[in-house]
Image (cartoon, helix red, strand yellow):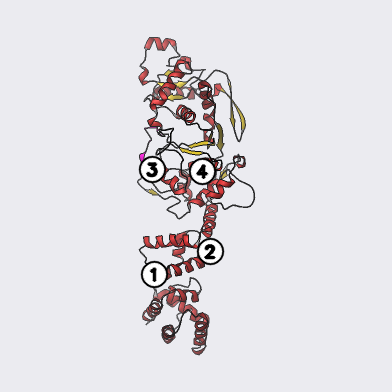
Amino acid sequence: MIRVRFAPSPTGPLHIGNLRTALFNYLFAKKNKGSFILRFEDTDKERFLKKSEKHILNSLKWCGITPDEGPDNGKYGPYRQSKRKHIYKKYIKYLLKNEYAYYAFETKDDLKKIRNEYKEKGKLFLYNSLTRRKLNNSLNEFYFQQVKPNKKNATIRLKVPDSTTIKVNDILRGNIYINSNSLDDKVLVKSDGNVTYHLANVIDDHLMKISHVIKGEEWISSFPILQLLYNFFNWKMPNFLHLPLILNPFGKGKLSKRNSNQFNFPIFPLKWKDPIKLTNILGYRELGYFPEALLNMLAFFGWNPGGKKEIFSLKELISTFSLKDINLTSARFDKEKMKWINQRHLQCQSVSDLTRLVKRSLKEKKIDFNNDQKLQQIIVRIRSQCTFVYQIIEKSIYFFKTPSLNKTYIRKVLLNQNINKNILFLIIEWVKNHDKNNLKLLKIFLYKLAINKNINISYLFKILRISLVGKLIGLDIYFIIKILEINDLIKRILNIIVLLN
């Protein structure tokens, strides 16, 4: 059975790169009727943030990526590594007993000093088979016997074999061969007793029966270490696939928060409050993006099913997704493409769904508009001009609020001509006594009025638009007249008469 996991570290907000990893795991699981597991790697106590876990959970919920197992349910728990210390103990003992691991007693300052000494000689320091016998650890018999250090304050390191070729297999890349002498003896247990990523992941993935591990390319460097641990435990290794990087829009390197600040685009699904600067960083939700549009974009960072179709719902992504369509090429983030995708998703929304979203936004702005039928007509007319739901309101605000009139602006756009206010009074009288929704009668009246008063019909429309909208913008003037209530229509025309007195 297919079982995959998303295992974020709650040390900060959920980055869209990590969300892409969650998405690919989720799509693979759902496509193959498998299980998607959420597990928190919360053993880094120095960087742990409780609100980070909440941000991750809320982001996944907003996107519709629902775990089958996780902190709230599942038979393979606990799903937080900080709650699994009792599980790890016997496996640590096994590694030590079989000499696959050893105690190391250097402090951080000791290691920093050693690294600097190597650096001054133009060398790179690795704690491995070439150096470990001269350092302060349980493999250095002279040091261990003479000093008899306290194991409680020690770290536990993996004993990487000397001069061995380690073979790992990645679904995308095939077999990869690494010389063990190029590897560090990675710390498996820190001096505070907490296990590190390498050991916890292997144990948890094995016990939770994970079949496939799908994660970012940046983790390839730890791949051989994981392979060694699986070998030492004599466990079958899951299938591994390392996703290509998401590159920043300009220059080199992967997408980062710094790029987001520099080029002004969101990098988190939801808003995040910076704990140091205490400033709010808006996410895709707050900026008006649809969650399915965000997932649609992220899916194409490294995956391409072929063909010309670019707009997918989450359901369509699940039915189409396949690991064989993932490629090695890193994808560059494109904020303009993201806007285009959101625009296409907006056009795909049903009128009823958009009406619900617009009504909610109007309520948040404390604007009362309770005529759903007219609201739907406005949405149908204006949606093609919009990328975000909030733009529907921005571009049609004159339907919901009486416009503020600026005398200087109005005189300027009307070329400072003296407006015959009698024309506006005649329009008011006609509206009072006729059906304004009978557009045929309305057109005949306005054209006759223009002829009788010897003014250009376009100039009459300009006066009327300024009266009703406040500016020379907006939808078809006849449609505006049709949507506005009679009392509101008359009030707006009277406002410009008063203003121009």
Among numbered discs 2 and 4, the one appearing first in the sequence: 4
Residue 21 inside the magenta-drawn segment: no
Q: Residues within 10 Å of mark 4 (few under 14, many from 20)?
A: many
Task: Using the numbered discs, state the Cα–Cα distance from disc 2 to disc 4 in whole angstroms.
Answer: 29 Å
Q: Nearer the viewer, mark 2 or mark 4?
A: 4
Q: Earlier in the sequence, mark 2 or mark 1?
A: 2
The alpha-carbon separation of the residues under discs 1 and 4 comes to: 41 Å
Q: Nearer the viewer, mark 1 or mark 4?
A: 4
SS at mark 4 in the image = helix
Q: Earlier in the sequence, mark 1 or mark 3?
A: 3
Lateral position of residue 49 relative to residue 184, left or right: left
User: Can residue 414 be seen?
Assistant: no
Q: Which residues are magenta?
A: 42-55
Provide the secondary structure element on which disc 3 rests: helix
Amino acid type of the residue tagged 4 in the rendering: Leu
> Total label count?
4
Tell whether label 3 touches label 1 (CB within 8 Å).
Answer: no
Tag 1 residue: 401
C-alpha distance separating marks 3 and 2: 36 Å
Task: Kindly identify the amino acid type of the residue bearing the numbered disc 2.
Answer: Ser
- Amino acid at the residue labelled 1: Lys
Can you give x and y, in whole percent of width and height, for residue 51 in the image?
Answer: 36, 42
Residue drawn at point x = 50 percent, y = 71 percent:
475
Q: Earlier in the sequence, mark 3 or mark 2?
A: 3
Q: Is residue 173 left or right of residue 199?
A: right
Residue 54's disc is: 3
Question: Could you tell me if the residues under marks 1 and 4 are in contact, i.e. CB atoms within 8 Å?
Answer: no
